[in-house]
Amino acid sequence: MSQSITLARPYARAAFGAASDEQQLPAWSQALGFSAQVAADPRVAALLLNPQLSREQAVMLLSPDGAGQAYVRFLGVLADARRLTLLPEIATLFEQLRAEAERVVLATVTSAAELPEGELDTIKAALARRFGRDVQVSTAVDASLIGGAIINAGDVVIDGSLKGKLARLQAALAN
């Protein structure tokens, strides 16, 4: 995984640079999301490794309708370098670069049960105060947390789950 992130980073930076130059960050974000989702499919991933798949076929398979010429050329560069399988990592890194440029924090709130809308707004407001930036929150449900939530916001992880508290208590008792 870390090797694929290392390989994907220069491509993500190049994509971000091209999108910034064109002032098309949202369009590139959408196109990369589409291409990454297609490339992440195990059947497509196997096909992308097939040497009989031509560059043009690969680009056509991964290009969303209405993609700009610069984006299609970017996919061509990836195809020439045999790096199309890195599209999910490239898309993730691109979104991180975009969020940094737009001064937005991307946060994921994983809770034991679905959070009510008001509670999610409270968490979002608290994160905005803490980071001094706009916050975009996505949610996930993991029943194994028993209760509470885990918040991942960039490099910051806030574990307020009951499962995490029990684990910390167990570690403290063991020492």
Image (cartoon, rainbow, N blue to C red):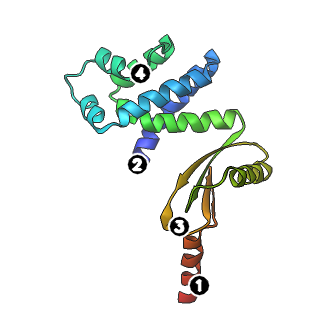
Alpha-carbon distance for marks 4 and 3?
40 Å
Mark toward the viewer: 4 or 3: 3
Q: Earlier in the sequence, mark 4 or mark 3?
A: 4
Query: Residue 75: which numbered mark, if any?
Result: 4
Tell me where residue 61 appears, x and y as whole percent. Answer: 34, 21
> Is the residue under label 2 in contact with that under label 4 (CB below 8 Å)?
no
> Is the residue under label 3 in contact with that under label 4 (CB below 8 Å)?
no
Mark toward the viewer: 1 or 2: 1
Please, what secondary structure does the residue beneath circle 1 have? helix
Q: Amino acid at mark 4?
A: Leu
Q: Earlier in the sequence, mark 3 or mark 2?
A: 2
Residue 49 seen from this side: yes
Q: Amino acid at mark 3?
A: Leu
Residue wearing tag 3: 145
Tell me where residue 104 appears, x and y as whole percent. Answer: 70, 39
Q: Amino acid at mark 1?
A: Ala
Which quarter of the figure is the C terminus placed in? bottom right
Please, what secondary structure does the residue beneath circle 2 have? loop
Q: Earlier in the sequence, mark 4 or mark 2?
A: 2
Q: Residue furthest top?
A: 69
Query: Residue 172: which numbered mark, if any?
Result: 1
Alpha-carbon distance for marks 1 and 2?
32 Å
Q: Residue at x 43, y 37 (%)?
A: 88
- Is residue 3 or residue 87 the one in the foreground? 87
Residue wearing tag 2: 1
Mark toward the viewer: 3 or 2: 3
Alpha-carbon distance for marks 1 and 3?
19 Å
> Residue 57's quadrant in the figure?
top left
Q: Earlier in the sequence, mark 1 or mark 2?
A: 2
Tell me where residue 172 appears, x and y as whole percent. Answer: 59, 84
Q: Residue furthest left?
A: 52
